[in-house]
C-alpha cells in the first residue's frame, strides 16, 4: 500500500517503513523556526527542560519580524531576548533587523527550507515551505522548545487531500487566487489536520513565488501542511541556495488519498475574500462597489518579487487614490534591493505609496498600518478575521497584488482592467 508525500516524509524521519493516517510518531526535525512573538515563550520553556545547549545551532532560525523595527518597549524586550539567546547558543541563523525579512519569505530565499524535510515553526504560516516539497507545519512554543532541545517532535500522521488544477491560468490570476478559490469551496475547516497536495498542469506552470503564496495559506483551510511535489522549477530555485544536502520525496503511484478535488483554472478569475473569513470569496466580477481606506501589498503571502513587479506594472504612471493609504512592504532586504534596482520603488513612490522595511507589521494588527473603527482595508495578506488589522469594527478584504494595486488607484475594490 503506497504513501503520500507527507506520509513518506514522516516515515523516513520516524525511522519506519510505513506510517498510516492517525498514527502517532516521534520524528526528527530538520529545521526549527521562531519569531519575536513566539520564540520568547519557547526560550523560557527551553530553560525549564534542563539542557544547556540547543540540539544543533545550524538547524534553528530566530527571526524578529512581527513587531520590528520595535514598536514599543515590550516588543524591544522580546527582540532583546532573541538576540541574547542567539548569542548564548551561537545560533547561526539569527537575523537582526537590517538583515532579516518576513520569516516565510526569508528562509526559502536563504536556502534553509528544503525538499523532503520536516520543518516546524512557532508560527502558523510555517506551512509555506510545503511549496518546496517539505512537510512544514506550525507548532506551539512549547513544542518549539522541545525541538530546540531534542531535535525531535511528535506528530499525528495526517490523511491527505489531493487538489488537482487543470486548465490554464487567466490574466492577473495567481497562486493566491487558486488558494482563495479552493478555500471558498471547502471552507476554513475543509482540510482540518489534513495534508493538502496541490497537483496538475496549472500547478506545474506556477512560479516559485506563486507556489509559496499558495502553500502559505494551507493553514487557512485548517490544514497541517500544503505540499507541492518538487519538480524542475523547485530544484532550479532551491539547488543554488541550499545550505544542506536534501533528498526530494514523491507520493507513491498507489498512494491513498482521503478525497480528490478537481478544479478547472479556466473558471477562476481574481478572487476577493470578504470579511471576516478567508472562505468568504467572490470572483472580482461579483464584488460590487466596496470603497476602501487602505491597501497593503506585502506579507509572507505576497511580498515577493513577482508580487511587487505585478503591482508596479499596474501602478506605473498612476497615483494612489486621494482617499486611501497605500502601503507596500517588500518581504526581505534582498527583495527590497532588487525592487530598487528594477526601478519599482520609484514607481511606488511616484504613486505616493509608503514603502516599508520588511516587517509583518499591519498583517497581524501589530504596527505600520493599524485600522480605525469603521475603516476598510484591501490586503494581500492571508487572514481577515475580526480585528485582525486593528479595531474590531474595521474590515479586511483579501486579494492578489494585481487587484490590490488597481484598487489603490480607484479607491474601491477593482479589477486590473479598470485602470489599464
Image (cartoon, helix red, strand yellow):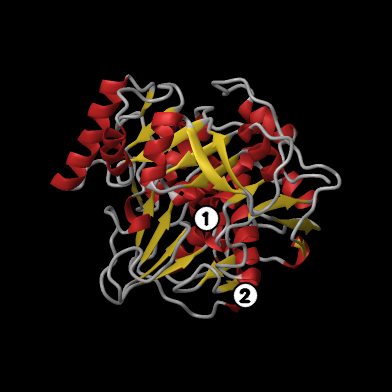
Q: Residues within 10 Å of mark 2 (few under 14, many from 20)?
A: few
Residue under the image location 36 percent in, 45 percent down: 141
- Tell me if residue 163 comes above or below residue 293 in the rendering: above
> Can you see residue 316?
no
Q: Where is residue 30 drawn, in percent x and y?
A: 53, 30
Which of 196/200 is in front?
Answer: 196
Along the horizontal axis of the image, is 419 left or right of 352?
right
Which of 196/327 is in front?
Answer: 196
Residue under the image location 60 percent in, 66 percent down: 183
SS of the residue at dot 2?
Answer: helix
Q: Where is residue 297 drawn, in percent x and y?
A: 44, 53
Q: Where is residue 223 drawn, in percent x and y?
A: 58, 57
The furthest residue to the right: 254
The quarter holding residue 276 reads bottom left
Q: Earlier in the sequence, mark 1 or mark 2?
A: 2
Return the mark for residue 401: 1
Which of 262/7 is in front?
Answer: 7
Amino acid at each position: 500500500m503506497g504513501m503520500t508525500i507527507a506520509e513518506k516524509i514522516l516515515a523516513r524521519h520516524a525511522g519506519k517503513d510505513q506510517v498510516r493516517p492517525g498514527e502517532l510518531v516521534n520524528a526528527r526535525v530538520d529545521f526549527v523556526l521562531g519569531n519575536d512573538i513566539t520564540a520568547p515563550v519557547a526560550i523560557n520553556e527551553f530553560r525549564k527542560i534542563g539542557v544547556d545547549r540547543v540540539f544543533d545551532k545550524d538547524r534553528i532560525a530566530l527571526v524578529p519580524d512581527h513587531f520590528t523595527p520595535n514598536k514599543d518597549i515590550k516588543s524591544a524586550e522580546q527582540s532583546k531576548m532573541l538576540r541574547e539567546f542567539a548569542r548564548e547558543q551561537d545560533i547561526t541563523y539569527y537575523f537582526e533587523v537590517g538583515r532579516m525579512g518576513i520569516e516565510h519569505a526569508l528562509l526559502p530565499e536563504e536556502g534553509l527550507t528544503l525538499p523532503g524535510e520536516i520543518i516546524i515553526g512557532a508560527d502558523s504560516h510555517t506551512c509555506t515551505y510545503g511549496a518546496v516539497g517539505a512537510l512544514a507545519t506550525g507548532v506551539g512554543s512549547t513544542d518549539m522548545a522541545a525541538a530546540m532541545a531534542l531535535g525531535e517532535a511528535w506528530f499525528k500522521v495526517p490523511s491527505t487531500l489531493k487538489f488537482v488544477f487543470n486548465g490554464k491560468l487567466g490574466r492577473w490570476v495567481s497562486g493566491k487566487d487558486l488558494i482563495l478559490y479552493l478555500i471558498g469551496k471547502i471552507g476554513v475547516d475543509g482540510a482540518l489536520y489534513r495534508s493538502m497536495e496541490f497537483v496538475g498542469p496549472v500547478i506545474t506552470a506556477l512560479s516559485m513565488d506563486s507556489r509559496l503564496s499558495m502553500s502559505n495559506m494551507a493553514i487557512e483551510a485548517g490544514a497541517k501542511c500544503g505540499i507541492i511535489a518538487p519538480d524542475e522549477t523547485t530544484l532550479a530555485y532551491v539547488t543554488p541556495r541550499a545550505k544542506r544536502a536534501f533528498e526530494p520525496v514523491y507520493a507513491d503511484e498507489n498512494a491513498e488519498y482521503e478525497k480528490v478535488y478537481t478544479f478547472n483554472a479556466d473558471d477562476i478569475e481574481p478572487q476577493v475574500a470578504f470579511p471576516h473569513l478567508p472562505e468568504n470569496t467572490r470572483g472580482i466580477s461579483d464584488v460590487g462597489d466596496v470603497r476602501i481606506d487602505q491597501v497593503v501589498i506585502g506579507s509572507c503571502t505576497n511580498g515577493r518579487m513577482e508580487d511587487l513587479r505585478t503591482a508596479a506594472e499596474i501602478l506605473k504612471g498612476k497615483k494612489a487614490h486621494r482617499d486611501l493609504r497605500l502601503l507596500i512592504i517588500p518581504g526581505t532586504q534582498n527583495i527590497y534591493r532588487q525592487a530598487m534596482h528594477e526601478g519599482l520603488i520609484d514607481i511606488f513612490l511616484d504613486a505616493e505609496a509608503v514603502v516599508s522595511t520588511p516587517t509583518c507589521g499591519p498583517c497581524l494588527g501589530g504596527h505600520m498600518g493599524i485600522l480605525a473603527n469603521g475603516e476598510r482595508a484591501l490586503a494581500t495578506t492571508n487572514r481577515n478575521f475580526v480585528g485582525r488589522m486593528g479595531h474590531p469594527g474595521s474590515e479586511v478584504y483579501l486579494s492578489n497584488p494585481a487587484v490590490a494595486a488597481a484598487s489603490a488607484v480607484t479607491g474601491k475594490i477593482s479589477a486590473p482592467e479598470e485602470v489599464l
